[in-house]
């Protein structure tokens, strides 16, 4: 992106913040309803979490607030124990997140493979899309939900189409005004001045209120309470950090800059502790609003902080105006976000990548839609790790090295020795058929875990039973030390690493290592 002058950059940040603030309102209200709490609980969370993370977080330009991924976990807690327990859970959630950041474990997000990332963004795009479908429904007198009647539905779709058309056309004429904001203003003007009958923000709920007030959650502080909130706090903390850190990675790719994962963990934790004391439902990064912010050209912290402050201003002073914004305009903006978030390139490459990677992409997307983001990412990482272990285990082999003869055989071992490859490793050697002197050179191999050590110990036992002498070359010092603890006797000076004659004497278990 071309470098802007400071005044131009400030103008971009202000307009982006205004756009994001308008998009935050219906999301915060909707997710509050999902969690079973009042709309102000969601709005206060969007304000506090958004402001704190924008100012102190590890990714400038990222937007945080109340999210659906957290709301679906909160609903059970609120239903069974009440909103005060939710506030205390959010505080504990923040403490856990700050502990992760303080221990510098934000780097664990590096363990998420690229196919999982693709599945994450595709699944989240589908979730955002499905969430917008609620705007096409209404609740009847008997409490059942139905689709809007034909006429109202046509008006809704028409306004959404106008919003999307404005968003796509504005950049062809000017890039100095956020296209999403232009879409909202144009459709709002059509509805207000044209007298169009359609659902507005105010039809969902009033967003009028006062400043959030500090208060300690009104629950008994005892072990029983801790046992109630602790499982929910851990799940919420995991979901919040996974969604936030994956969003950091996504924005890193868009901006070609590097965010600070541990700082983001600390910031998210501090924001959730604060919002719990001020009557908010907690939150994390919002990929939809973050994408709106990025596409509006924002790169500084100013846009996110301003969006949060404007949200508070709407609550305090401008609720009547914001409540007149048609829902169709905001749905249109989110549909554009869906199109921009979904990785369409993944559909083109799905037949070109390994079958396992394609499977992981589809699996993560499906699990994200069916359950929640944390479970989807964990499942994706586990499946990817198992695929990697399976493929790596198949790559272990030996070749006979020069110097072998009738009385001496030298094996060059290639590949990784770990839990998944020990069976293949065992099948490579046949002690009764080998000569008296056998050498295994580990120069092109590495022993990774306790299972690998035990495989070597077992091999030594087999060669001793067959009256063969086994020599091991180029084992790491750590591996030598563990074999010593396992009572595998290595003749000679291990530091010189010439050749080690291995015999067995009361074999025991090693302590792992390589």
Image: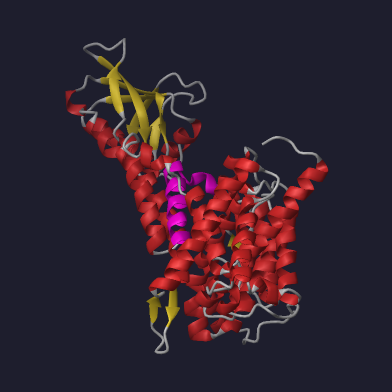
Q: Is residue 50 above or below residue 337?
A: below
Q: From this viewpoint, which residue is outermost toward the bottom?
A: 142
* Residue 223 in the image, given as x and y percentages of width and height: 57, 82
Any magenta on residue 366? no
Residue drawn at (41%, 86%), measured in percent from left and top?
Answer: 143
Quadrant, the C terminus: top left
Instruction: Pinpoint residue 396: horizontal percent, then vertical percent.
Output: 31, 30
Question: In the drawing, does residue 53 fall left or right of residue 425?
Answer: right
**Quarter of the image that includes the N terminus:** top right
Q: Residue furthest right?
A: 7
Q: In the image, is 497 to the left or to the right of 105? A: left
Magenta stretch, residue numbers: 108-129
Q: Is residue 238 left or right of residue 61?
A: left
Where residue 99 sits, quadrant-wise, is: bottom right
Q: Is residue 198 above or below residue 223?
A: above
Task: Count how many numbered circles sit on residues in the image.
Answer: 0
Q: Is residue 175 left or right of residue 410?
A: right
Magenta stretch prevailing secondary structure = helix
Q: Is residue 112 magenta?
A: yes
Q: Determine the image quadrant of residue 204.
A: bottom right
Determine which quarter of the picture holds residue 265.
bottom right
Residue 65 appears in view: no
Residue for point 55% across, 65% down: 67
- Residue 487: x percent and y percent? 39, 39
> What colouring does the structure picture have?
secondary structure
Instruction: Return the residue nearer the eye: 183 or 1.
Output: 183
Give the residue furthest to the left. Answer: 433
Residue at (70%, 35%) from the top-left corner? 2
Say which residue appears at 52% left-offset and 71% top-offset.
71
Q: Nearer the viewer, residue 155 or 121?
A: 155
């Amino acid at each position: 992106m071309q470098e802007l002058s400071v005044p131009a950059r400030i103008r971009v940040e202000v307009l982006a913040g205004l756009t994001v603030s308008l998009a935050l309102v219906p999301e915060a209200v909707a997710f509050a309803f999902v969690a079973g709490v009042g709309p102000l609980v969601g709005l206060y969370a969007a304000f506090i979490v958004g402001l704190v993370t924008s100012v102190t977080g590890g990714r400038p330009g990222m937007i945080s607030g109340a999210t659906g991924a957290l709301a679906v976990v909160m609903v059970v807690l609120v239903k069974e124990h009440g909103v005060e327990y939710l506030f205390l859970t959010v505080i504990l959630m923040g403490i856990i997140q700050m502990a992760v950041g303080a221990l510098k474990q934000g780097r664990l997000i590096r363990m998420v493979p690229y196919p999982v990332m693709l599945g994450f963004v595709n699944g989240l795009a589908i979730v955002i899309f499905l969430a917008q479908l609620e705007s096409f429904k209404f609740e009847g007198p008997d409490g059942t939900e139905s689709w809007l009647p034909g006429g109202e539905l046509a008006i809704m779709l028409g306004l959404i189409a106008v919003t999307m058309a404005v968003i796509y056309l504005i950049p062809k004429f000017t890039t100095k005004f956020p296209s999403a904001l232009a879409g909202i203003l144009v459709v709002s003007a059509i509805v207000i001045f044209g007298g169009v009958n359609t659902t507005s923000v105010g039809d969902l709920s009033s967003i009028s209120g006062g400043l959030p007030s500090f208060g300690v959650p009104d629950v008994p502080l005892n072990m029983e309470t801790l046992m109630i909130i602790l499982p929910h706090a851990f799940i919420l903390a995991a979901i919040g950090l996974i969604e936030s850190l994956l969003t950091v990675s996504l924005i890193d790719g868009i901006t070609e800059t590097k965010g600070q994962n541990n700082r983001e963990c600390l910031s998210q934790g501090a924001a959730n502790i604060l919002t719990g004391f001020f009557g908010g439902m907690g939150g994390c990064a919002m990929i939809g609003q973050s994408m709106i912010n990025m596409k509006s050209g924002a790169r500084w912290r100013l846009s996110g902080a301003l969006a949060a402050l404007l949200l508070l201003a709407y609550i305090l002073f401008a609720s009547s105006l914001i409540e007149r914004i048609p829902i169709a305009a905001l749905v249109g903006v989110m549909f554009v976000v869906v199109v921009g978030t979904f990785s369409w390139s993944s559909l083109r490459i799905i037949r070109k990548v390994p079958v396992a990677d394609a499977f992981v992409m589809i699996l993560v997307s499906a699990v994200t839609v069916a359950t929640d983001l944390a479970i989807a990412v964990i499942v994706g990482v586990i499946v990817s790790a198992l695929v990697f272990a399976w493929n790596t285990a198949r790559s272990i082999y030996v070749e006979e090295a020069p110097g072998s003869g009738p009385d001496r055989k030298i094996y060059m071992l290639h590949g990784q020795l770990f839990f998944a490859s020990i069976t293949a490793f065992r099948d490579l050697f046949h002690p009764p058929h080998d000569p008296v002197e056998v050498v295994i050179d580990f120069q092109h191999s590495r022993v990774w875990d306790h299972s690998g050590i035990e495989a070597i110990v077992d091999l030594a036992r087999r060669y001793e039973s067959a009256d063969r002498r086994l020599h091991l070359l180029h084992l790491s010092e750590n591996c030598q030390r563990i074999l010593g603890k396992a009572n595998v006797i290595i003749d000679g000076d291990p530091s010189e690493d010439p050749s080690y004659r291995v015999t067995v004497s009361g074999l025991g278990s090693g302590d792992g290592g390589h």
